[in-house]
C-alpha cells in the first residue's frame, strides 16, 4: 500500500529542516512510526532514533528493521520519554490520528515537554478548508501474481473537527477480484488553527508539501510541512 512512498526523500528533507532550525543534536523520536522505515533512515543519517505507535504488530516489524532503536507502544497524545530529545517527527499525515482537537492539544503539549531547548517538531498536515472531496490518489503494485490497486482521498463535510481518510484496495488476479473499503476518522484542522495551537509552545514555520525543495507555503496550498522550534 505504501510502495510509492519515498521514505528516504521524506527523511532527508526533515533532516535538512533540522539542520536549518535545530540545536545540532541527534536524538530523535518518530510518532506513529509504523514499521519504522523513517526511523531506519534517520539511524543511517547518524541519529539515535526511537519510535512509538499504537499497533504492536507494526512495532514488531520495526524492531526487526531497526534493531538499534527502541520502540514503545504508546498513544501520541499521551506519550512520555525518558530523556529530552532534539527532534520529533510525525510523517504521512499521522498527526491527524489524534482523536479530536483536545487530544491534538495534548499531543502538542507532550511534544513540547519531550523536546530539549531549541528542539524541533516536524510533521505534515492537510488544511480542512481546502479539502476537495472529489479528489483522490491511486497507484498500483504487483505481488505474487496479483495486481493491487490502492486509492485514498480526504473527505470533510465542511464543519466540525472530524474529517475522514477514505481507502479502497482492489486485489485482482486472472480469475477473481476482491475489493475492500475503509474509512479512518481523523481530526480536522486548518493551517491557521494548527498554527494557533502551536504558538504557545513553538516558533512555527510552514513550508510547501515538497520533499525535494524547501519552499515557503503558498496561500493556495492545502498540504503543508510544519517545522516548529521549541520556545
Image: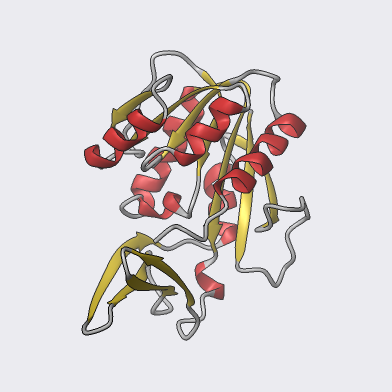
**In the figure, is residue 86 to the left or right of 23?**
left
**In the figure, is residue 84 to the left or right of 118?**
left
The quadrant of the picture occupied by the N terminus is bottom left
Seen in the picture, residue 168 relative to 75 is either above or below; the reply is below
Percent x, y of residue 181? 26, 75
In front of the other: 202 or 180: 180
Q: Residue at x 38, y 79 (%)?
A: 157
Seen in the picture, residue 205 relative to 167 is either above or below; the reply is above
Q: How is the image coloured?
A: secondary structure
Q: Is residue 203 visible?
A: no
In front of the other: 121 or 162: 121
The quadrant of the picture occupied by the C terminus is top right
In front of the other: 219 or 2: 2
Q: Residue at x 63, y 39 (%)?
A: 228
Percent x, y of residue 27? 55, 20
Q: Residue at x 27, y 33 (%)?
A: 60
Outermost residue on the top side: it is 83
Percent x, y of residue 113? 47, 24
Q: Residue at x 56, y 74 (%)?
A: 130
Image quadrant in which you'd find residue 145: bottom left
Percent x, y of residue 103? 34, 46
Image quadrant in which you'd find residue 116: top right
Q: Is residue 97 visible?
A: yes
Image quadrant in which you'd find residue 63: top left
Mark count? 0
Amino acid at each position: 500500500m505504501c510502495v510509492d512512498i519515498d521514505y528516504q526523500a521524506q527523511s532527508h528533507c526533515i533532516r535538512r529542516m533540522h539542520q536549518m532550525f535545530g540545536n545540532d543534536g541527534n536524538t530523535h523520536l518518530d510518532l506513529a512510526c509504523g514499521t519504522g522505515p523513517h526511523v531506519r533512515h534517520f539511524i543511517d543519517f547518524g541519529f539515535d532514533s526511537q519510535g512509538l505507535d499504537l499497533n504492536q504488530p507494526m512495532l514488531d516489524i520495526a524492531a526487526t528493521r531497526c534493531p538499534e532503536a527502541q520502540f514503545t507502544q504508546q498513544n501520541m497524545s499521551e506519550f512520555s520519554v525518558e530523556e529530552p530529545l532534539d527532534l520529533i517527527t510525525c510523517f504521512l499525515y499521522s498527526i491527524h490520528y489524534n482523536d479530536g482537537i483536545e487530544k491534538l492539544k495534548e499531543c502538542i503539549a507532550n511534544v513540547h515537554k519531550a523536546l530539549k531547548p531549541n528542539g524541533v517538531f516536524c510533521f505534515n498536515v492537510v488544511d480542512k478548508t481546502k479539502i476537495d472531496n472529489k479528489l483522490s490518489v491511486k497507484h498500483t503494485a504487483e505481488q505474487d501474481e496479483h495486481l493491487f490497486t490502492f486509492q485514498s482521498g480526504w473527505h470533510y463535510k465542511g464543519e466540525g473537527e472530524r474529517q475522514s481518510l477514505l481507502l479502497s484496495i482492489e486485489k485482482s488476479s486472472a480469475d477473481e477480484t476482491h475489493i475492500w473499503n475503509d474509512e479512518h476518522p481523523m481530526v480536522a484542522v486548518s493551517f491557521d488553527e494548527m498554527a494557533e495551537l502551536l504558538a504557545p509552545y513553538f516558533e512555527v514555520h510552514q513550508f510547501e508539501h515538497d520533499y525535494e525543495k524547501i519552499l515557503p507555503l503558498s496561500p493556495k496550498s492545502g498540504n503543508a510541512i510544519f517545522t516548529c522550534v521549541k520556545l
